[in-house]
Image (cartoon, coloured by chain):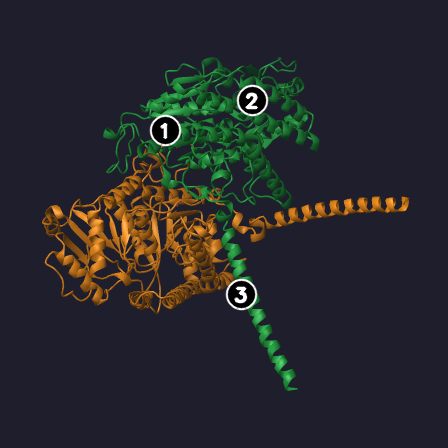
Chain colours: A green, B orange
Amino acid sequence: MASHSACGIYTCFSIVLMPLLITPLCDGGKVLVFPVDGSHWINMKIMIEELHARGHSIKVIRPSTSWYIKEESPLYDSITIPENIALQNFLQIFLDDYIKAQREGVSSFTFLKLTWQFLSMLSVAHSMNCDMLAQIFHDESLIQSLLDAQYDLVLTDPAISTGIVLAKYLNIPTVLNVRWISSGDGLFAIAPSPLSYVPVPGSGLTDNMSFMERLKNMFFYSLVVFQERFMVGPCYKAICHKHIQGGCDTISLLQEADIWLFRSDFVFDFPRPTMPNVVYIGGFQCKPAQPLLPDLEDFVESAGEHGVIIMTLGTYVKALPNDIAEEIASVFAKMPQKVIWRHIGQRPSTLGNNTLIVDWMPQKDLLGHPQIKVFVAHGGTNGVQEAIYHGVPVLGIPLFFDQFDNLLRLQERGAGKIINLADVNSHSFDQGLKEVLHQDSYRHNMQRLSRLHRDQPIAPLDHAIFWMEYVMRHKGAAHLRTEAYRMPWYIYYSIDVLVTLLVAVTFFVLSTFIMFRFLCCRGRTSKVKQH
Amino acid sequence: MASHSACGIYTCFSIVLMPLLITPLCDGGKVLVFPVDGSHWINMKIMIEELHARGHSIKVIRPSTSWYIKEESPLYDSITIPENIALQNFLQIFLDDYIKAQREGVSSFTFLKLTWQFLSMLSVAHSMNCDMLAQIFHDESLIQSLLDAQYDLVLTDPAISTGIVLAKYLNIPTVLNVRWISSGDGLFAIAPSPLSYVPVPGSGLTDNMSFMERLKNMFFYSLVVFQERFMVGPCYKAICHKHIQGGCDTISLLQEADIWLFRSDFVFDFPRPTMPNVVYIGGFQCKPAQPLLPDLEDFVESAGEHGVIIMTLGTYVKALPNDIAEEIASVFAKMPQKVIWRHIGQRPSTLGNNTLIVDWMPQKDLLGHPQIKVFVAHGGTNGVQEAIYHGVPVLGIPLFFDQFDNLLRLQERGAGKIINLADVNSHSFDQGLKEVLHQDSYRHNMQRLSRLHRDQPIAPLDHAIFWMEYVMRHKGAAHLRTEAYRMPWYIYYSIDVLVTLLVAVTFFVLSTFIMFRFLCCRGRTSKVKQH
């Protein structure tokens, strides 16, 4: 276990094992953080807390309309960039529409419409972030202050590319805190990803695909490339062209990053090729459960041997469509279990006495409580990782983004079950819930995942901090990063070499053929002459 | 730091960080070891020592003619398989010839001859090991005792495939302790390895190649495939066919292994794609230096400010050709430094008073002594890793196997210099030695590598042990391993999908073309009719 806090002379940047030649950097580093709002911020904040606890000073760049990232905090100083429209409102409208469309059932036409809506939403969101980036570059005194501050590290979530462009301009070593990026799974940009067994994010596929599924995977890959080339990349590229010598594009900026802290691991994800500078920190936010508040504890304990079901569909969903809420409430009402349901909106008329509706719940602490039998969840990365950590099986109702893919990974391992939003009714929900509750295999498989996840040589958060401090100590980690991304594609794929070999072989075969033909003809001609 | 020794209840298989759900396996595991002789055994023995210290019981399978692996040891029990010819003698003849041929200078003809000799040697060596494997399968009581013993783990070095075939037969989780395997670098068999930036072992190339170098890399790759298909693989395949249901081949057996403990890291090696079940443990054998024996310490200290040069060309070279030894000795004699030279064979007539000739030297402890200025070495993996650990620059004279490639990695980073055997004379050796001694960049670069190498979140040996115990705890690590290797090549490379898409597009284009032509012709025909 990396015990960074108890190692004498190397207090802040200690290596317990092999300290002989390490230059300690004990004054604390200066970290510039460019986060992404929403659930992404929840993760980033945990890293900031840990960096702060280890004596680093942190500056956070946030938009004025941010809904999670506070301007003032004991953990960090902030720089606020004025923004006119809140991404939140804009996203909320899209998400409500998206849920409605899904509820109507996904025909081919709806699927195409949803995909196009999603791409358009992404494009607008990135365009808003490009405006923010342009504002930063426009503010000369801000840029000068960022240059003068001489940060040791940029820590950024590349779901929005603003941070990596700024890091390039400031020429500061960069660490990515990454799950998905604009152009799909970050690993497609960095490590070879054979489409035969690496499912594209959003495709809803596993690593074991039929022929038709591999066709679908290829289609999704084309979509990812299209999205990056035509809907996300161009606005950043224009800013790069204007402000950064030699220009840049978002994909190569990602590939230039020193370390990728990937919020996943291979207990959760399917095995696939990776690179030496990708560090897997899935579940880094998980901690042993804290005791519940007395009221909640009483409610949980009152369930007795039947235990408790908890349900939340995440922070993005303000209100479930009424019909679904009614159906779900009626199923809960008939269960012998107690239920804690994070539900915002109209109180369902079918609600039973056993169901406690809350605005917010201490999800991590509840998941760690031995009384919790099933977690009904939307499949956000954080919730799924916490369910794995605590070994609680999941009944999943995926809504958008990576949620279906996340839940699929649990379902594939027999540790969870998916019901699509279009299929949710009292019958399907009742069946699904009882299946996950009563079939022991769900709990056993989830507990197996939990054992595997917890069995690591170093805690994921310690691992994350180690690599951030490593990058500060050594001013980057270029030796862990391949420079192959700088190659043109025909060199990367050895096309030039293969074509040369093909030409050489063809030339050899042809010239041999011509020579033989010539010799043969000459033979015949002389025979003819002899005759 | 994984402090396995001080963690209460999970004494032997402890995880300090997240012990909640881990099933302890405290009786100690049963490990069956199938090692490779020579310098490979030095590495394996360190792992065995550590496993033994942690309470595991170990059984080693060795040939009767082994020159390093003792039959009796306090660390392990052994099973001895009778062998008629010692691989050692056979290898020695080849190596002596190989050195002689190199000394004569490497013309294209010599190069081809050497390559062929090398391949033939490999083929014979593997054929001897196949005989040993056949003997094991022939001995029914031995096989039964191996089955009865119910080992928890097979630990094997796949430079010789005997261990992986046996592990498959016994159906035991397998960990590979691997540097190079018969078919070249193990990673070519497991992770995607684009030939544009991943140099094939033995090619003498870096990750930054010109067009001609990439052609050369392709040639070496073909050689590796040829070697595996026609010279190494067949004899094991025949045994697989006879004894293992469904048959097997050495490459897929490697791909089936649970964990690869790779004796390298990316401070030493060029960055490249890797897989989740590959653990990098380069330099795991390195330890802080122990004090020298008084006589040797006196000799080292007597060098004063000039310091000491140490030289060894490894265990395989019994005697350097006399002319080279004379040239080297004459250069050493003129240096103000003291020299410690591990030299077997005739004492050079040009030897100076400053040079101490020894049969054996405490290489690790000397490299860690502050008086040592340069390490003259052949470039074996162990020596190079120890030089990196202690930050001592290297003057390399590569002889065979991976030695040139190893030294090239140091040279590329400005931490070492290579002189080929053919070029060694008093002038070149004198120049090379003085360059590495007096150009500060060599020492600075090597010390930078040392700092990077030592800066790891967990010591490589602890990492290795963690993963071996992990495999025992969880009865394998299948979730970290892709099953993609089971796909036929045309599926793996998505050829079937691409051909289908190509046919579909062609059909679409052609039918559109025909339709337009038809419409167009009809138009014309009606016009003609109207006229």
Quarter location, residue A397: top right
Disc 1: which chain?
A
**Residue A114 visible to an observer of this rendering:** yes
Q: Which residue is mark 1?
A: A153
Q: Residue furthest front?
A: B531
Q: Which residue is mark 3?
A: A508
**Residue at figure coordinates x 20%, y 63% from the top left:** B325
Position of residue B119 relative to residue B305, above or below, is below
Secondary structure state at the residue bearing disc 2: strand
Secondary structure state at the residue bearing disc 1: strand
Please state, as top left, top right, bottom left or bottom right, where the N terminus of chain B lies in the image: top left
What x and y, as percent, mark residue A181? Answer: 51, 31
What x and y, as percent, mark residue A233? Answer: 53, 32
Spatial separation of the CA atoms under disc 2 and disc 1: 39 Å
Q: Which residue is mark 2?
A: A311
Q: Amino acid at mark 3?
A: Phe
Q: Amino acid at mark 2?
A: Met
